[in-house]
Amino acid sequence: MSKAKNKFLKQLKTFAKTLTEYVSTNSNEWSIKGFIDVEENIYTISSDSKIISKILEIQLFPKFKEFAEANGYDIVLAEKQNWYPDLSFVNQKNPKLKFAVDIKTTYRLEDYSGFCNGFTLGSHGEYFRNRTSTKNIQFPYSEYEAHLCLGILYTRAVSTDIDETEILRLSELDNITSVIKDLVFFAEEKWKISSDKGGSGNTANIGSIHFIKDVLKGNGVFAHLGEAIFDEYWINQGVLQVPDPKKKGSFKKLTKLSEFLEFKGMDTSLINAPKPKRKNK
């Protein structure tokens, strides 16, 4: 790890630890309760994860600005909604020094002990495979010193406590249940929390591990293999043709890290197997 990357990541990790208090009430609920109009009517927030993520991003931006200024960086926001990353930190003294920071949120699973729903860690499509591409990315992938995740874990409110059709008055603010609570923030390099599975349906997104303790420790599937193998695997995932173990003499598209390591003649025991989900008893 370069000195610049090590320093920035350390600063970002320290910064992340300050954010829970900034966005939370004394009872650990999210401090955002809803939307208010000019008549002082409050409309409760939907529990939709995309809406929660966007509002958190808006709420946090002043803090990101403070962090950037304190550490000698300018922030460049993604020009378009689907561009990567959410935030580009560009060093003021050396503009060639850039860090990609994506804001990622997910919720703790109710039916499993210690697991979350998982993060989508960005595309492994055009700009990931072609590191000089400018398609759907603020700066070419290769120009970033590191690709980092500012992660947010939260617990969703019980659905019976939230009525999205209800309109409340400002005087009732203290009685409104927040849609999320118990927020935890962390910062980590993207590859360190990655799994070898996609993150969202049929789209070309990198998925994360799900066991929360491993997420917070950066103990992902590639932990013993390193970033170079992470890059090589995800560049080839879904593209490279590898032998099909079920059909002798046939080939299939690469879908598993074990297949990739076998193809390269590497030891599959180097895979840091994710902790399996187990239902609470």
Image (cartoon, grey):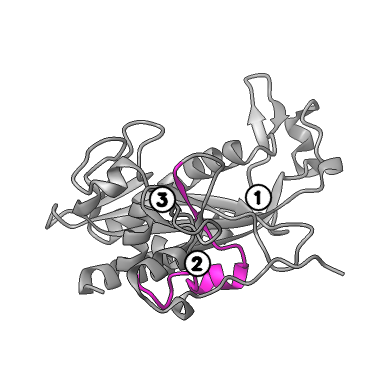
- Across and down, in percent, residue 257 comes to 45, 64
Whole-number angstrom distance, CA of label 3 to CA of label 2: 17 Å
Whole-number angstrom distance, CA of label 3 to CA of label 1: 21 Å
Residue closest to the eye, 248 or 121: 248
Mark 1 closeness class: few <14, some 14–19, many ≥20 residues within 10 Å: many
Amino acid under label 2?
Lys
Label at residue 102: 3
What residue is shown at x 74% (from left), y 39% (from top)?
Answer: 173
- Across and down, in percent, residue 202 comes to 52, 39
Q: Quick one: label 2 or label 1, which is nearer the N terminus?
A: 2
Residue 261, by quadrant, is: bottom left
What residue is shown at x 64% (from left), y 28% (from top)?
Answer: 36
The residue carrying mark 1 is: 30
Q: Which residues are magenta?
A: 204-226
Amino acid under label 3?
Asp
Task: Specify the quadrant that holds the C terminus.
Answer: bottom right
Vertical relation: 54 (above or below) 266: above
Residue 213, by quadrant, is: bottom right
